Image (cartoon, grey):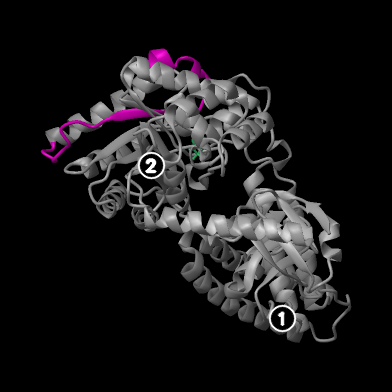
Amino acid sequence: MKTLEGIAASPGIAIGDAFQFQAADLRFERRRVDDPAAEWRRFEAAAATAAEQLAEVCDRATAELGPEQAAIFQAHLMMLEDPELRVAVQTAIEEQGLNAEAALSDAAAFYAEALEALDDEYLRARAADVRDITGRVLGILLGREAQAGPQAPAIILARDLTPSDTVLLDKSRVLGFCTAEGGPTSHTAILARALGLPAVVGVGEEVLAVPAGVTVVLDGAAGRLVVQPDEPELCACRERMAAATALQAEAQRRAMEPAVTCDGHRVEVVANIGSVRDAQAAVQAGAEGVGLLRSEFLYLERSSLPSEEEQYRAYRDILEAMGGRPVILRTLDAGADKEIAYLGMPHEQNPALGVRAIRLCLARAELFRAQLRAALRAAAGHNLKVMFPMVATAGELRAARAALDAAREELAAEGVPLPERLEVGIMVEVPAAALMADRLAREVDFFSIGTNDLSQYTMAADRTNAQVAALANALQPAVLRLVARVIDAAHAEGKWVGMCGELAGEPLAIPILLGLGLDEFSMNPPAIPMAKQLIRSLEVAAARQVARAALELNSAEEVAALVRARVPGV
Ligand code: PEP
Ligand code: MG
């Protein structure tokens, strides 16, 4: 028995045979060709075949994973059709007489390296996409395809998996993924989470030496791969899997019931969504509403601003899909990791600390006005609330409210139906807002704590940088102390507090948050049934003790250990 440690990328446990996934051998000979025109035609034919394959992968990804994940492959299609890339390949073939393989590989390497040199984490990660699409065309040119997946259910071990490798594998024969390379935001990790399969990434070269066919245990939550487990290890795993399956089944069965602790305290469990499809998934998962509608979904993947009318219809469709349940619309949170090219935002040295979110909306009055008008129109006859992201000062909150009031007055003058009252809140995701929560609480109807940003700003640790992931962990006592402060400040003013950062759906955090008095937990729809089930097993008095103890600890690891010791089954 041997245990390999890696990064926990997607939770769940699997026991099965190891399957070593071999990417296609893409080595080629660099040579001069006699007939460059024919070579260019050969490249064009391969690119056309790749485009056909990609269209198929895209359809499959849409069906299995939804349009958001499928967007990766649409981006690949665009890269494949990129005129600059094509001109570079054509020039190398026609002017230097290179073979198509060498011409493509040079041009792609140039692009991938240029992307890798950029400051922006998101664009850097696109280098992997350039390699994926190049690999596909090279495979076609060379007549070599990636090895087919396993014939029977198995745990896939690989150096790294491209998005298309992951999508093309027959999921009925995949029990989980374990890769030598990759971080928590790699495509393998994202797709595994979307598929609900366990995954461990960044294990190192050793995973490639695991003989095919031996039994392995993959623990996605602990980030471990156990090779040739002994009988006691296997027994323990089977027990944990059986208990998890039973718990999951019970959680699914009771998904539509409210989350009431065993001593009778009810909290709201709602969803983070970004589309109508998500809204439908949220209702099916038992969401009691939407705690965070990320309105960026309307602004991304396009080349110009959505009109007021388009926004109004999109919000109304989501409100209708939620069937009368409350929906909190977050106004545009553009900038930093959510870059929108057509907004023409000037280059900033530190975009996460720059003109983003509410700062941008206040600077672009017309853009903000259209969104606020659309939200107010959609709110008539529905249960819509509005919240502003990244508020740091009372001045920003007042300016945002003034813009909302102005939009309301305009619409009233136009005779447009409006909601009688619209609750207004802010996201607390900047430490300044958390520290001033007692003042801000007087001017809002509610707070929603955004721990994803609150942790990065509190800990000075970039949320997109895997190297500082342990620091950016929202279980850090420093972050929890701010959370406690925000909840107390709001309650002192009679206001309610939600949380829409990832922490709210994290089983290790739920007992603490309950103990701190959080009123509303907002999370990705798939996490809802289990979160509700966990809350049902907790008692508020005991949760308060855990929370108090957590605030006195020194590290996120100590907090996690405390919860594991005090709360069975997390
Ligand atoms: C957050 O920062 O916690 C949050 C929910 O917002 P986003 O992840 O969209 O920045
Ligand atoms: Mg945020």
- In this picture, residue 406 sits left or right of residue 364: left
Identified at 74% across, 86% down, the residue is: 38
Quadrant of image for the C terminus: top right
Q: Do the residues labelled 2 and 1 touch (CB within 8 Å)?
A: no
Q: Residue 22 placed where, x, y %?
A: 78, 72
**Residue 260 spot, x, y in % from top left:** 36, 39
The part of the chain drawn in magenta is 414-440
**Structural crowding at the residue carrying mark 2, measured as other residues with C-alpha within 10 Å and reported as few (<14), some (14–19) or many (≥20):** many
Given residues 51 and 183, the one toward you in this image is 183
Q: In which quarter of the image is residue 374?
A: top left
As drawn, 554 above or below 36 = above
Q: Which residue is drawn at 54% across and 65% down?
A: 74
Q: Residue 422 colored magenta?
A: yes
* Callout 1: SS: helix
Disc 1: which residue: 140
Residue 560 showing in the rendered view: yes
Q: Which of marks 2 and 1 is in front?
A: 2
